[in-house]
Image: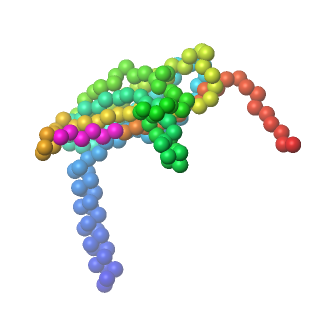
């Protein structure tokens, strides 16, 4: 009897929670990271898709940021902001469109370009595509909330090398 009651309650509550989540909506950026391998002098084209699953019109602004070591080294990497970057990627990134409006239940594809100079040295370069998202509706106290979604960008630059090793 107790199991049956728990099942009935769960069957009623779970759909209610899903309906509330769908009503609140969400914002999706795909993919959440890009891992790219390229050669010096190569131009690489990739894209992000942003999906507005909310009932609000959203304003989006794109900017690129490098990654840096976090203030606490145990925390890994963070957006560079005012810290010196580790192997910066932003000098090689561009996008034709950086500001756009996304209607309710709409989606947009944002192409980006990675332009590698011919004199580039091999190794890894790291950054993020930061999408700052604001709704067009203002809050009760005339406030505006800004959401930042930052898919990561990892670039590996290859050059002809001989990879070999032997154990002593």
Q: Residue at x 20, y 39 (%)?
A: 144
| Region of the chain picked out in magenta, as a range | 143-148
Q: Is residue 100 visible?
A: yes
Q: Is residue 166 above or below residue 122?
A: below
- Extreme residue in the bottom direction: 1
The colour scheme applied to this rendered structure is rainbow
Q: Is 91 left or right of 58, judged from the image as shown? A: right
Residue 167 placement, left or right of 105: right
- The quarter of the image holding the N terminus is bottom left
Quarter of the picture holding the C terminus: top right
The front one of 17 and 142 is: 142
Q: How many numbered tags mark residues here?
A: 0
Q: Residue at x 15, y 43 (%)?
A: 139
State the residue in front, 128 or 66: 66
Q: Examine the rendered structure and indicate whether residue 3 appears above or below residue 143.
A: below
Q: Is residue 104 visible?
A: no
User: Is residue 146 found inside the magenta-colored segment of the image?
Assistant: yes
Rendered image quadrant of residue 121: top right
Quarter of image, res 56 = top left
In the image shown, does 81 or 159 lie closer to the viewer? 81
Q: Which residue is nearer to you in this view: 80 or 168? A: 80
Compared to residue 57, the image places residue 2 above or below, namely below
Q: Position of residue 119 (x, y in %)?
A: 61, 15
Residue positioned 55% across, 29% down in the render: 87
Instruction: State the residue at coordinates (50%, 46%).
Output: 72
Q: Is residue 80 left or right of residue 14?
A: right
Across and down, in percent, residue 100 comes to 28, 27
Percent position (x, y) of residue 45? 48, 24
- From the top left corner, tell me how far across and down residue 62 is, in percent: 35, 29
């Amino acid at each position: 009897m107790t199991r049956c009651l728990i099942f009935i309650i769960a069957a009623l509550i779970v759909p209610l929670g899903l309906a509330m989540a769908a009503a609140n909506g969400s914002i999706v950026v795909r993919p959440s990271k890009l891992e790219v391998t390229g050669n010096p002098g190569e131009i690489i084209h990739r894209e992000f898709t942003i999906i507005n699953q909310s009932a609000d019109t959203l304003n989006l602004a794109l900017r690129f940021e490098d990654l840096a070591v976090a203030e606490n080294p145990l925390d890994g990497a963070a957006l560079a902001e005012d810290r010196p970057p580790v192997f910066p990627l932003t000098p090689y990134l561009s996008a034709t469109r950086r500001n756009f409006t996304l209607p309710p239940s709409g989606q947009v594809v944002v192409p980006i370009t990675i332009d590698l100079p011919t004199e580039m040295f091999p190794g890894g370069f790291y950054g993020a595509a930061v999408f700052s998202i604001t709704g067009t509706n203002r809050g009760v106290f005339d406030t505006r909330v800004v959401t930042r979604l930052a898919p990561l960008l990892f670039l590996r630059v290859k050059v002809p090398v001989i990879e070999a090793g032997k154990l002593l």
